[in-house]
Amino acid sequence: MQIVETSNEGLKRAYALTIAATDIAARVEGEVKKMTPQVRMPGFRPGKVPANLVRKMHGPALHQQALEGSIREAMDKLVAEKGLRPATQPDVSLAEGYEQGKDVELTVSVEVLPEIAAPAIDGLKLERLVVEVSESQVDEAIERIAAGQKRFEDAPEGTVSADGDQLIIDFAGSVDGVAFDGGTASDQPLELGSGRFIPGFEEQLVGVSAGDERTITVTFPDDYPAENLAGKEAQFAIVVKAVKHAADFVADDDFAKSLGLEGIDQLRGLIKGQMEQETAGLTRTAMKRALLDQLAAGHDFAVPPSMVEAEFAQIWQQLTDEAAKEEDPAAALAEIDGEKDDYRKIAERRVRLGLLLSEIGQANGVQVTAQEMEMLMRQAAQQYREQDRQRFIDYIRSDALAAAQLRAPLYEDKVVDFLFDKAEVTERNVTREELQAAIEADENGTPAEVKPAEKAAPKKAAKKAAKAETAEEAPAAEEAAPAEAEAEAKPAKKAPAKKKAAEPAADAEAAPAEEAAPAPKKKAPAKKKAAEA
């Protein structure tokens, strides 16, 4: 095989490869010899079919097989002889007009990974921002839980209702004297001031007592989903059956037991542990952002354009998806479009950091163990239907790129933890607000290294891409650095289909609709009572 380098610019390489026709022919003949003893043909004893007949019957398929095998070997030889580290799958083209029996001429274009000098990891200095979870914060959390578990007790006879009280009412609604569908309910609980009912409904029931009968007039909002009621004035005949006060909340063992726990100490311990875990995650995020900033500031090298483009495409998709959810999608899209260059620089930074972390990991023996990989696969498989989980695991085991993509985030975390251990770390106690502010310091714009001077930051939809620079969303390093980019290519095998996204969501959305009561201000399922908000 002949190899001629035709281009060498930056990280891009191009080669012309020639595979001799005799090499292809030799491969075909080798396969014919292997096949001949197994070929069966009428008129010939087993294993006695002449080679020329075998060649005639299977020649085209054998030639195609030999051609593909020769190209694979040629690519392996090219990579080995030239010491290439491809960043993405090489682009291989067969010369036009190729005919069987002629030399094979290939053109190969490939982007290679940059040569990265030994990363400087000495002298790293990091600050760990620590948030102490106070007992008062635990108390506030318990109170928030209690607010969602509010209980009401019968008020003394003759009590006049006020905001925060609960009424038990019967009501019957009508428009122009005609009852309408969904406008009637019995023994309906209503917390005054909750805003569950259409405007004006709850306000007119402040000051009633048990046994009172009252007719109120309200107007349905113009944007009410039921067209026959939108903007219409309606009357509701109401009978007040009971007035209830919110029960005093006491954070005691009985309250904890109502939540299925042994006592208040267990509840407090669980809440404190959850809060500490959450703040520890924020602390790590802040440290990782500072670490990435130091690495980015200390290393500058060219990165493969195709990897940058793939990373940018991912960021841009995220941004446009978020912009589409804004109140004015066109304006949001126009705003982020003006920041396109900034996000391309973010993509470049992310790729550079990914390659850098990979280099650090390889140089220091950081690895993801087989046991850790097995756990990753089984965790990832949980997002699929039970009958598809083993098929997903088999797919990951059989596809190197898919496995690398799954392994990459954990590998990056292990490299980051290695660097944390190497760094000089000081601790400083801060409030949760101060920690959050440190994380979000640059959230309203692009990272410091790429943010245009004195330039207004992109808003809302843009925030997520900027957040991605902080930590867990940053690019994942991998033992084989090009795997991240190569994973963008579609794998030959198809992973099992995920569960339908709508399946769990449907239940979550439907739950509130099952509450019986007058109709919502904006959305109302057809069977809901027409006064509930």
Image (tube, rainbow, N blue to C red):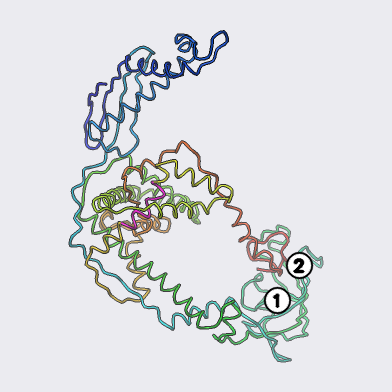
- Label 2 or label 1, whichever lies nearer to me, is 1
Tell me the quarter of the image containing the N terminus. Answer: top left
Q: Nearer the viewer, residue 172 or 187?
A: 187
x and y, in percent, of residue 251 in the image: 54, 85
Instruction: Tell which of 475 and 182 is nearer to you.
Output: 475
Q: Can you identify the residue that label 1 sits on?
A: 189
Looking at the image, residue 480 sits to the left or right of residue 270; the answer is left
- Measuring from the top left, give residue 121's x and y in whole percent: 20, 58
Question: 265 left or right of 463?
Answer: right
Q: What amino acid is at disc 2?
A: Gly
Label 2 Cα crowd, 10 Å radius (few <14 / some 14-19 / many 20+):
many
Q: Secondary structure at mark 2?
A: strand
Who comes first in sequence, dot 2 or dot 1? 2
Distance between the alpha carbons at the discs numbered 2 and 1:
15 Å
**Towards the viewer: 481 or 228:** 481
> Taking 58 as reference, is 153 above or below it?
below
Dot label at residue 183: 2
- The quarter in which the C terminus is drawn is bottom right
Query: Callout 1 environment at 10 Å: few (<14), some (14 to 19), or many (20+)?
Result: some
Q: Position of residue 309 (x, y in %)?
A: 34, 42
Give the magenta part as a residue range.
404-414
* 63 or 312, nearer to the observer: 63
Task: For mark 1, give the secondary structure.
Answer: strand
In which image quadrant can residue 194 be found?
bottom right
Which residue type carries mark 1? Pro
Residue 433 image offset from top left, x and y in percent: 37, 73
Main SS, magenta region, reads helix
Numbered label attached to residue 138 = none
